[in-house]
Structures are given as structure tokens and as C-alpha cells.
Amino acid sequence: MAAGRDSDKERAATRVTGAKPLDEIEREIAANTRAYVVGPYLQKRGAAQDGNQRSFVARLDEAVGLAAAIDLTVVEAVQVMLTALRPATYLGKGKVEELAERVKIDEIGLVVMDCALSPVQQRNLEKVFGCKVIDRTGLILEIFGRRARTKEGALQVELAHLNYQKSRLVRSWTHLERQRGGFGFLGGPGETQIEADRRIIQERMSKIERDLEQVKRTRSLHRASRKRVPYPIVALVGYTNAGKSTLFNRLTSAEVLAQDMLFATLDPTARAIKLPHGARIMLSDTVGFISDLPTQLVAAFRATLEDAIEADVLLHVRDVSHEDTQAQAADVQAILRDLGINPDDGQRVVEVWNKADLLDGEERARQLEVAAHRPEESRPVLVSALTGEGMDRLTAAVEARIARSRPVYALTLEAGDGRSLAWLHANGEILGREDGAEGALALTVRLPLEREGAFGARFPEARRLS
């Protein structure tokens, strides 16, 4: 999981020796690992006690999807309903023994628990099952480790992983009980191996945090340079696997990884594109959100959402074909609020109802009807990023929101004033154009706020319309 897993040195060694890349080796190991996915969910009178709005079946399906994202061979998904949590093993004694027997019969090498286990619970389950056990946090960390490609993404992954490992340095192995001799002038009792391991991890975390500060400064410089270009930022946000990267590729003709897989995108990607009426925007793809994301991961990956925090327009991409689309939307809205963004701000947030191609004719008509009855300023847009359906409606919605804060002017250019016309095309949007007498051009233009001053100095005779 180290940050340097995809280093230039490893790639060079692979080319010289013909050895398999590390990612390919990991995929082979995972594919040969038989796994159980266990969903232990607290319930009271048939409803979840943890505030999660999803059905238990959908939550278990998502956990299986997370396991598939790192190529594990899932032998069986087991749903376990609990009325109370056991401090030692999370599950009740009878269920633990039953699962242990099934693990042995099916030759299971890994049990994925769709919950947050304490270090003691994880160790106790491993002893009883006789195989490796990871919880939801560990599984998501493993996915992040596979997906991160930029320096920042790799550092964020390693920091989150070390923070996770630090809490799991319990006395699981005998070497952790040894003591080392004292050192320095004081002498005295030495530190135990577990204390030494914690110290080493803390030192590495401190170094990563310093490196991250440098990376963040570099990213802030990049954002500052983008701000000097008069392009509004439009960011894609949404639940993981909602189709953000496919939509990003559709709008930009880029080749960002887009697969039917949870957390296919981790590193933020931005491209400048031109909208139909001439406005240029910076479109940014972001990491997908997910329910029950551990706190330390939200904090670790907050930097990847900085583009969303500073965006002029947010496209909240939803998979409307998913049975839990409402619950997924609620999770995304909750995270946006945590980031200081009001998800109900129709001026800034556009709901994009994606995957219309997976709806039958009747359901598509119903969704269009529902959208049409919403207020115009917060009306959702039904699209299919895969087929291109609804892209004209989406770009029109983005243009409308960008335009609301931009002034509109009317002016006339003399015949042959190509330089002024080129300036207007480069710095604003030409909304209307009429040929006047003797070759003059009557224009209606819309400008970014930061270009209004330069426009007024260049065209003092222009008349503001709005």
C-alpha cells in the first residue's frame, strides 16, 4: 500500500526483467483468494439501527461490489441480523462458530466484514476463523491503494493506511512483547517493540503530512493559475459508480478510467471545454462518495474534493436506475453539507439523473414528468452519459447557471474590426449577431465578471442590458 508502489523504478525493472507489474500480481493473488462477504447489520423491528436508509440486501450487494473492485473471488455473501453487538467478536458466539465451520469447509482465505471492527474484534475473529479478516475500512483502503495514481492520491492513501494500522498494533505477535535496551543519557527501561513500531509509523505519518502540504501548495498554485483564466469551474460529484467519469468523458472526449466498478476514479481530473454558446469552463471529475465512509478516510481525501468546494457549479450525478438512488443522494447531500456546500442551492447545484438508458419507456416518461414539475431553477436533467441522451439539456442548464451572474451588453462594431470581434470571442460569449448597414455588426455579448472592466475600457459605447 506504500506510496511508491507505481514508481518509475518499478516500471523500469518490469521492462528490463520482464517481471509482472505489481498491480497484475495483486490481481492474481486476489483472484485466487476465496472470500466470504459478511454483512452484520443491527436491526430493531426490521429496521436498521445505525441510521442507514438502505435495505440490508442493497448494503450487502454494495459490500460484494467493493470486494469485486479488488478482484476477490466471492464464494458467498452472508447476511447476519444482530440485535446487539458483542464486544469481543462483534457477532454472537453461535454465529461465529457457524461461520468458522463454513470457512473451513469452503477453504476460505479471507472474510470481509461489512462493518467497522475494533482491533481486538478483528484479532479474535481471525483466531476463530483461521484466516485473514478485514473490515469495511480495510477493504476501502485496499481499493484506494489500487486506484490512486497521482502523487497526492498515493500519499493520501498511505497516510490513511498508516493511521488505520497504528490503531491495530495490538499484541497479536510475540515480537511485540520484546523490549529493547534504553538509549541516550538517561538509560533506564527500553521501549517495547510495539512502542517502537508505533514511533516508526508516527515518524512516517509526519513526513507524509509534510509532503502533502507541499503537494497541496502546488495544487493551490494550479487552482490560482486557473482562476486567472476566465473559466468557471464545474465539478462532477456523486455516489461511487453513478457514472461521473463516463459523463466526464462524454463532455470532454477524454479517456478517464470509466468502468462499472466502485471507486474507479480516485484522483481529481480537470479539462477545459467549450459549451455550445461559446462559454469555456473547467470541468473537474472527483472521487465518488459512499455511505459509512470511515471518518479518517473522509479527512484524508478531503483534498481531492477541493475542486468541488471551490466550483462555481456542481453537477450532482445520480444513478436513477439504482433501487437505492434516494438513499445514495441523501449520503452525497450530507457530505456536501459537511464541506460547507448547500445541496439545495439550485443556482449552484444541478441534479443530473444519469443512466436513463437503463430505464424502460414507462419509467423514463415518469422521470421526465417528475423533473418537469420541479421549479425551473432547481430542475433535474435526465441524461444517459453512455448514449449521449440529454447532453443538450445538461449543457443548457450549466450555461444558464453560469449566465445568471454574468452581465450582458449590446454594442456595434464597425466593418472590418476583426481584432475586436476576436477579443469578444476569446473573452466572452456572442449571444446575438445582426448585420447592419455598410457591414457593421450589432452584437449582444455576455461577459465573465472579471472581464467586465477590460470590456468597458475597450468598448466604452457599449450598453448594458442586464
Image (cartoon, grey):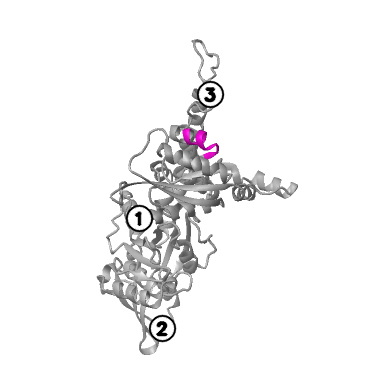
Mark 2 to mark 1 CA distance (whole Å): 64 Å
* Mark closer to the chain start, 2 or 3: 3
Residue 21 in picture, x, y percent from top left: 66, 49
Kind of residue indicated by mark 1? Arg
Kind of residue indicated by mark 3? Leu
| Residue name at image x 54 percent, y 51 percent | 75
Q: Residues within 10 Å of mark 3 (few under 14, many from 20)?
A: some
Q: In the rendered image, which residue does mark 2 sit on? A: 415
Q: In the rendered image, which residue does mark 3 sit on? A: 176
Q: In the rendered image, which residue does mark 1 sit on? A: 54
Residue 373 visible, this orientation: yes
Q: Residue furthest right?
A: 17
Magenta stretch encompasses residue 129:
yes
Q: Residues within 10 Å of mark 2 (few under 14, many from 20)?
A: few
Quarter that holds the N terminus = top right
Residue 433 found in image quarter: bottom left
Q: Nearer the viewer, mark 2 or mark 1?
A: 1
* Mark closer to the chain start, 3 or 1: 1
